[in-house]
Image (cartoon, rainbow, N blue to C red):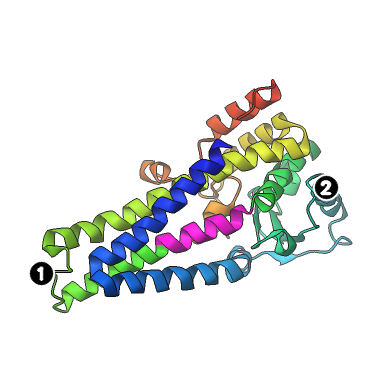
């Protein structure tokens, strides 16, 4: 699919930015540092991203006895998607939202807020949970974690360069980019990395909408849920969400607090476009 190809291209571009930026900033030494940082950060992201996301959100694991309806819905959808049953969590927020995490389907977790269980009807809740299971099926959590870590490495390299300049680092040697190039790398590289990371996130959201609609069999149920969730986020941004994990939620948890600049750098596609694509799926048009 187009979204998967676009994700591959964007990840390749982000990796090239990290390696190339490291080489330009520090020559062969910088290149080695960049590669080591990328490998180390990707390893950490692969193994610990689920624990970090759940901790930041204040999520608490629940049992089938505590939330039988939630377990029943997730279990049925997981069976349809040919996935193992994920761990189930509930966060203390009353603003409706949800996210999935975990490095692979065998270590996946789905978290919903307290509010989503009150706001959505059964079909809409199925649509949201199918979207989250689509992220698990597509291994999007791993992809987004790798993208976030690569972007973080490039930002860290820019900070290292800034400190080197402050303490008299020589940027006029043969391997250095010179003063103008140094300043450009410090400013442009982190912004470029963030833009690519956000483009990857938006691409994966579109794909999860498509696969999630196929899993639940009702594209309009997911479309209606997205409209409700965005309206709720505008009225009351989530209290327990963290900017570091905001990209994982099905809708932007800070939509209501967003300035025009924040919208420009959003990790989520416009809800109107997501709804339009789901409406097209409901009429037999695929993306």
Q: Which residues are magenta?
A: 139-151
Q: Is residue 242 visible?
A: no
Instruction: Name the outermost residue toward the bottom.
Output: 167
Q: Nearer the viewer, residue 7 or 115?
A: 7
Real-space CA distance between mark 1 and mark 2, rounded to the nearest whole angstrom: 62 Å
Marks 1 and 2: which is nearer the front? 1
Residue 145 is one of the magenta-drawn residues? yes
Task: Please tell me which residue is depicted at 24% across the width and 63% down the height of the picture.
Answer: 24
Where disc 2 sits, the SS reads helix
**Can residue 280 be seen from the camera position used here?**
yes
Name the quadrant containing residue 143.
Answer: bottom right
> Percent from the top left, x then y, of residue 132?
68, 49
> Based on the displayed image, in which of its 4 quarters is residue 245 positioned?
bottom right
**Quadrant location of the C terminus in the rendered image:** top right
- Name the residue carrying label 1: 172
Predominant SS of the magenta segment: helix
Pointer 2 residue: 73
Tell me if label 1 and label 2 are in contact, CB under 8 Å.
no
Percent x, y for residue 228? Answer: 64, 37
Assign a secondary structure to mark 1: loop
The residue shown at (18%, 63%) is 182
In the rendering, at what x and y percent does residue 268 appear? Answer: 51, 44
Please tell me how crowded label 1 is: few (under 14), some (14-19), or many (20+) other residues with Cα within 10 Å: few
Q: Earlier in the sequence, mark 1 or mark 2?
A: 2
Instruction: Give the vertical position of 77 relative to 89 (above or below).
Output: above
Indicate the quadrant containing the N terminus: top left, top right, bottom left or bottom right.
top right
Q: Is residue 175 left or right of residue 286?
A: left
Q: Position of residue 80 (x, y in %)?
A: 82, 44
* Residue at 43%, 68% in the rendered image: 38
């Amino acid at each position: 699919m187009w979204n998967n190809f676009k994700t591959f291209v964007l990840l390749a571009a982000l990796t090239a930015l990290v390696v190339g930026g490291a080489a330009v900033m520090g020559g062969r030494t910088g290149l080695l540092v960049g590669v080591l940082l990328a490998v180390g950060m990707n390893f950490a992201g692969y193994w610990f991203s689920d624990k970090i996301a759940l901790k930041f959100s204040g999520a608490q694991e629940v049992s089938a006895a505590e939330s039988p309806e939630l377990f029943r819905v997730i279990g049925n959808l997981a069976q349809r998607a040919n996935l193992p049953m994920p761990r189930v969590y509930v966060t203390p927020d009353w603003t409706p939202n949800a996210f999935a995490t975990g490095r692979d389907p065998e270590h996946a977790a789905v978290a919903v807020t307290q509010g989503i269980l009150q706001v959505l009807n059964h079909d809409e809740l199925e649509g949201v949970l199918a979207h989250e299971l689509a992220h698990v099926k597509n291994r999007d959590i791993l992809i987004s974690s790798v993208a976030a870590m690569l972007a973080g490495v490039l930002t860290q390299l820019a900070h290292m360069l800034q400190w080197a300049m402050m303490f008299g680092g020589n940027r006029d040697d043969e391997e250095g980019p010179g003063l103008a190039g140094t300043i450009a790398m410090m400013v442009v590289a982190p912004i470029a990395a963030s833009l690519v990371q956000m483009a990857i996130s938006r691409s994966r959201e579109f794909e999860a909408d498509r696969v999630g609609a196929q899993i639940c069999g009702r594209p309009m149920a997911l479309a209606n849920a997205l409209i409700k969730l965005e309206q709720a986020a505008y009225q009351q941004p989530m209290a327990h969400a963290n900017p570091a994990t905001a990209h994982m939620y099905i809708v932007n948890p800070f939509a209501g607090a967003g300035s025009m600049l924040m919208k420009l750098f959003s990790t989520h596609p416009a809800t109107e476009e997501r709804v339009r694509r789901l409406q097209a799926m409901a009429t037999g048009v695929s993306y």
